[in-house]
Amino acid sequence: MCIRDRGEMRWVLVRRGLLLYAFGALLEWVWNGTILFFYGAYFMLAALLFTLRARWLVTIAAAAAVSGHAIAWWAEDHQATWLPVSYTHPTPPTTSPASARCLHSSCDMKK
């Protein structure tokens, strides 16, 4: 396998992420609960972070860890009654229209 430049490798990640995202959204219509669109979103996020230096990756990872801990700490004291489910997805619902559909379908399952 030949070594490609970073820009080309970034577009490979984006294309693969879009393919996974689209296929996962289509598969969601047939089989509820698929997570392929999450992997597609992760691929596209990886394409954004792909060329960053280690210092920036560590900074972003630390900020994500602190933010996650702060949200978990806040959630202990506050009931999120506005959420239609009692759990959260691995990615925010705003990153995936299909995950909003998944939230809605899991809300229907509670009845």
Image (cartoon, grey):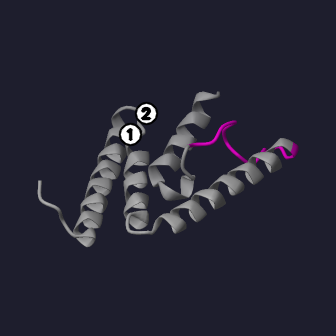
Q: Residues within 10 Å of mark 1 (few under 14, many from 20)?
A: some
Q: Main secondary structure of the magenta part?
A: loop
Instruction: Specify the farthest residue to the left.
Output: 1
Residue displayed at 40% across by 58% down:
46
Q: Residue at x 51, y 62 (%)?
A: 57
Above or below, 31 against 83 in this view is: above
Coordinates of residue 94 in the picture (x, y in percent): 55, 58
Q: Is residue 58 magenta?
A: no
On residue 28, the disc is: 1
Q: Residue at x 48, y 64 (%)?
A: 54
CA distance separating discs 1 and 2:
5 Å
The kind of residue tagged 1 is Glu
Give the left or right position of residue 21, taking residue 107 as reference.
Answer: left
Which residue position holds label 2?
32
Q: Quadrant of the C terminus?
A: top right
At x 73%, y 49%, the residue is 69
Q: Look at label 2 and name its amino acid.
A: Asn
Q: Neighbour class for label 2 at 10 Å: few (<14), some, many (≥20)?
A: few
The x and y percentages for residue 1 are 11, 53
Q: Which residues are magenta?
A: 77-89
Q: Pointer 1 and pointer 2: residues touching (CB < 8 Å)?
A: yes
Q: Picture coordinates of residue 7 (x, y %)?
A: 27, 72
